[in-house]
Amino acid sequence: MLEMQREHMLAGRLRACGRFLYYKMGGKVGQRRILIMLLRLEGLKQKELQDALEISSGALSEILQKMEDASLGTKKKP
């Protein structure tokens, strides 16, 4: 029972963190938006994508890694 309460509390805190990060980024950037942009502009470099989305390189790298982990795409080396 105590373990379920801890999991419930942790899930609530993770949701709060997610909402905070979403609004901190202006609610503009997400995997869906990145996928659409990559489909429309094939061959787009990561720096070009970063500039177009107006986000930091660290934030973009994190999102792209999550997408790669979920098999939504892979990075190509030049």
Image: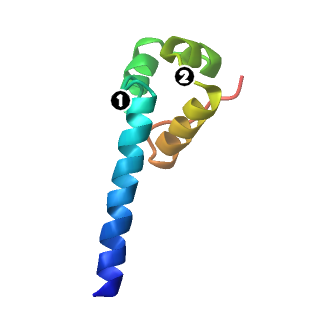
Measured as percent of width and height from the top left, residue 35 is found at 40, 26
Q: Residue furthest bottom?
A: 1
Q: Amino acid at mark 2?
A: Ile
Helix, strand, or loop for circle 2?
A: loop
**Residue tagged by mark 1?**
32
Q: Which mark is residue 55?
A: 2
Which quadrant of the figure contains the C terminus?
top right
Measured as percent of width and height from the top left, residue 41 is found at 47, 12
Q: Which sits in the foreground, 55 or 43?
A: 55
Which quadrant of the figure contains the N terminus?
bottom left
Q: Is residue 15 something that shows in the picture?
A: yes
Label whose residue precedes the other's in the sequence (1 or 2) = 1
Q: Is residue 44 something that shows in the picture?
A: no
Q: Is residue 42 above or below residue 26?
A: above
Measured as percent of width and height from the top left, residue 10 is found at 38, 65
Q: Is residue 7 above or below residue 23?
A: below
Q: Residue at x 38, y 23 (%)?
A: 28
Indicate left or right for 27 with 24 as reference.
left
